[in-house]
Each structure stands twice: as structure tokens, then as C-alpha cells.
Amino acid sequence: MPQPGPSRQRAYRMQARQQGMEATRQRITEATVSLHQQVGPAATTVSAIADTAGVTRATVYRHFPSKEDLVAACSAHWRSRHPAPDIAAWKAVRDPRERLYVALVETYTWFEAAGPMLSMVMRDLNQMPPFVAKAIGADLQSRVETVSRGLGATSSSSRRRMRAVVTHALSVTTWQSLCEGGRLSNSDAAAAMAAAILETVPSGAVQPT
């Protein structure tokens, strides 16, 4: 049987090397995600990442020269495994009350899996690269605006109160307090927070959108 020529052998070696690099990068990423959830981003060291991934510190830096590079890779990896509730699906619900309840139930259900990591990230947010806080803030603002649409707060003060309660309702710490601490179901917690939000807007002011 004829043997592969030099060019094909070289291509095989390059492919194997690339696959090995991708596998190493994946191990480093997964090790970092695991440590972030266990001890928090602030306490996660490069040495601990290297030990967990079974590589050297130099290998970690070779794949991720900066903290920003590593956090970005970890964030993308984690989000791919814990996708947040779809805002577009919320927008498709015309009745604001129904949209509010659906959004809260889906968010609280998501927190069951995402809560441990989110808690650590929020605790250490001021020690993480600025793009993390910016992304979290922008996402939360979009969710608050979507949930608030059509609820009918007419004055600036009532809108401010309503948005503050909506923001509170969409917080992982609120879910922890109600569901982990208070032992409410996700649906009961969602109903309680939906009622609190609707108390901030005038009666009869809720309109389909």
C-alpha cells in the first residue's frame, strides 16, 4: 500500500497539532469556568487554572495572553451551555401581564442552573474586566424594558418605581431569597413578584402591545 507523500504527512501533523491545541484550550476554558463557579473569579489564579487543566502556567498564557481573553472565552463557553431566556420570545407575548409572568418564570427556572455562577460573577464584578459589567448591564436593561413595556406607568415617579421593582425581580439574589431561602416554587415566586410590580402602576393602565 503506497505511503502518503511528504506534503500529506505534513498536513496530517499540522491537523493533529491544531486539534491538540484546541483540546488544550478547551481544557483551560472549562477549568476556569469550574473555578469561577467554585471560588469566584477574584479567587481564581492562573496556577489553579493550570493545575485543574493539567497544563503549565506558560501554556495558559500562551493560549490566553490576557485576563480579558480568558474571561471572554469562559463567558462564551458558559453561555453556550446556559443560554438565557429569549427576549424575542417575551416580546411576542402581547399581553403585558402574561409577558411579565412568563419572563419571571423563565428567568427563575434559568437561575436554577445559572444561579451559582451568576452569584459569583456579581459578587466579584468590580474585579473583572469592564466588558463583563457592561454586557450584564446592557442585557438587564433590555430585559427590564421588554418586561416593562405596556405596563402603563404614566408619571416619571411611577415609571421609576416600576422599573426599580422589575429590576429587583429579575435579580438572581431575589430568586435566591424567594426560592432557595423562602422555599417558594419558581411559579409562586414569579406570581408574587408580578403582583408587586403591578402594584406600582395605576389600575387599568396595563395595555396590550
Image: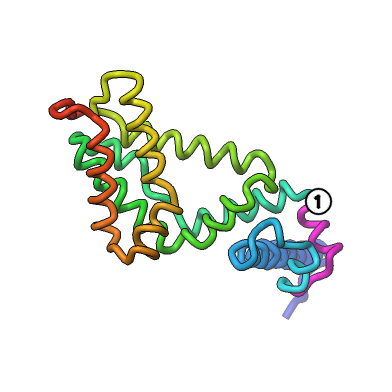
x then y, percent, for residue 108 = 35, 55
* Three-letter code for the amino acid on which mark 1 is drawn: Pro
| Residue corresponding to mark 1 | 65
* Residue at the image point whose x is 77% and y is 73% from the top: 51
x then y, percent, for residue 186 = 29, 59
Q: In the image, is 6 to the left or to the right of 27?
A: right
* Residue at the image point whose x is 45% and y is 39% from the top: 140
Q: How is the image coloured?
A: rainbow
The correct choice, above or below, for 125 with respect to 6 in the image is above
Question: Who is closer to the viewer here, 110 or 163?
Answer: 163
Image-quadrant location for residue 201: top left
Q: In the image, is 167 to the left or to the right of 29?
A: left
Q: Is residue 32 magenta?
A: no
Q: Which secondary structure lies at badge 1?
A: loop
Quadrant into which the N terminus falls: bottom right
Image-quadrant location for residue 30: bottom right
- The stretch of residues the image draws in magenta is 54-64
x then y, percent, for residue 157 = 35, 22
Q: In the image, is 65 to the left or to the right of 30?
A: right
x then y, percent, for residue 138 = 51, 35
Question: Who is closer to the viewer here, 123 or 143?
Answer: 123
